[in-house]
Image (cartoon, rainbow, N blue to C red):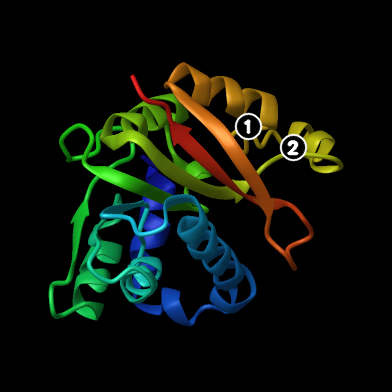
Amino acid sequence: MAHGHDVDRFNSWASTYDRHWMQRIIFGPIQRTVLQMAAEQVGRPNAILDVGCGTGKLLRAAATRFPGARLEGVDVAVEMVKHAQAMTPNGAIRFQQGTAEALPFPDASFDLVLSTMTFHHWHDQARGAAEVARVLTPGGRWLLADFVASGLMKPIRRLLRLHQFPDRAHLRGLLEGAGLKVVEERRVRGLGGQVAVIAILRESG
């Protein structure tokens, strides 16, 4: 799912991750936008998967927002998974180590998949998108939140060789190749308009 140095960094970060300033400034607004769009796109999801769940904060919020939904999280960093399990002692959410490129679930297991600020870490984004499509039910939604290169970010992306942050054309092509379709894009307020939450549909058939 992620490069080795990223995994090491997140393993070392796990115990203090939820107290980091980025939770309030960056991740908080993104997660609120994701949950609002989830309610609008899916209504009352039956089963939710968070790919790159970290310490499980988004899934714990989803448990309150969508009572009765089955909740699962995967993360490549084992220390993040351990911390998520410790923060959810009642076992209401199942966390396990796993990668986006090889999700440990049967086909059509979830009607909602979330990935917030993790897509740019995926080692093989095309393979990860295909795996998300596989575990989604027909008509299910994937809410992908990440930096999407646009406007001034396009030349900056090229200059810094930030190829892991896809531009729109590349992302749409990648999704279409997996049988997925963008149905909505919403910019997250307060982050300079550089983070988008993209609602992606797994089409029937």
Q: Is 11 drawn above or below residue 89 in the view shown? A: above
Image quarter of residue 168: top right
Q: Give percent across and percent down for residue 82.
A: 21, 68
Kindly state the secondary structure of the residue where label 1 is placed: loop
Question: What amino acid does circle 1 point to?
Answer: His
- Count the marks: 2
Residue pictured at 52% horizontal, 53% vertical: 117
Q: CA distance from mark 1 to mark 2?
A: 7 Å
Q: Are marks 1 and 2 in contact (CB under 8 Å)?
A: yes
Residue pictured at 66% horizontal, 37% vertical: 162
Question: Is residue 16 found left or right of 134 in the rendered image?
Answer: right
Q: Give percent across and percent down for residue 193.
A: 77, 55
Question: What amino acid does circle 2 point to?
Answer: Arg
Residue at the outermost right position:
152
Kindly state the secondary structure of the residue where label 2 is placed: helix
Question: Is residue 141 found left or right of 154 in the rendered image?
Answer: left
Front one among 72 and 159:
72
Residue pictured at 33% horizontal, 55% vertical: 45
User: Dot 1 corresponds to which residue?
Assistant: 163
Q: Give percent across and percent down for residue 127.
A: 38, 25
Front one among 21 and 37:
37
User: Dot 2 corresponds to which residue?
Assistant: 157
Q: Is 58 drawn above or below residue 43 in the view shown? A: below
